[in-house]
Image (tube, helix red, strand yellow):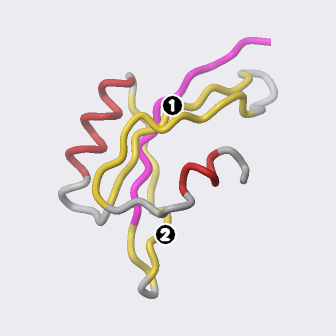
């Protein structure tokens, strides 16, 4: 059972006057995810850089950590990552 770390940039868009998750992009490193999220925040209402650790075999989520948020991010975003 090997753990795999993935860095993701989550974008947020406005649909029907609500802030909702948009596209996700994978980044090669933590620093890369932060830089990409910050750069993309200029074109989007908001972005977040996330570090995800999951079991490589089962895909089961071990943890998800917000590395940085830029612009507008939903208030319950951190809760939603933890399955709340």
Q: Residue furthest bottom?
A: 16
Q: How far across and how far down the image is residue 81, in percent?
A: 62, 47
Q: How far across and how far down the image is residue 48, in percent?
A: 40, 47
Which residue position is annotated with label 2?
Answer: 20
Q: How far across and how far down the image is residue 33, in percent?
A: 35, 33
Query: Is label 2 in a helix, a strand or a loop?
Result: strand
In the displayed structure, 5 sits above or below 17; it is above
- Which quarter of the figure has residue 58? top right
Q: Read off the magenta span.
A: 1-12
Which residue position is annotated with label 1?
Answer: 51
The residue under the point 25% across, 51% down is: 40
Q: Is residue 77 left or right of residue 19?
A: right
Q: Is residue 12 left or right of residue 43?
A: right
What secondary structure characterizes most of the magenta part? strand
Q: Name the disc covering residue 67, or none.
A: none
- Which quarter of the figure has residue 13? bottom left
Query: Is label 1 in a helix, a strand or a loop?
Result: strand
Dot 1, crowdedness within 10 Å: few (<14), some or many (≥20)?
Answer: many
In the displayed structure, 79 sits above or below 14; it is above
Q: Residue furthest front?
A: 75
The residue under the point 25% across, 54% down is: 41
The residue under the point 39% across, 32% down is: 27
29 or 75, which is in the foreground?
A: 75
Q: Is residue 33 left or right of residue 51?
A: left
């Amino acid at each position: 059972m090997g753990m795999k770390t993935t860095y993701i940039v989550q974008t947020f868009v406005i649909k029907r006057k609500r802030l909702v998750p948009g596209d996700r992009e994978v980044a090669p490193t933590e620093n890369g995810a932060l830089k990409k999220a910050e750069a993309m925040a200029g074109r989007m209402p908001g972005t977040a850089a996330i570090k995800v650790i999951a079991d490589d075999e089962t895909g089961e989520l071990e943890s998800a950590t917000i590395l940085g948020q830029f612009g507008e991010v939903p208030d319950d975003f951190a809760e939603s990552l933890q399955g709340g």
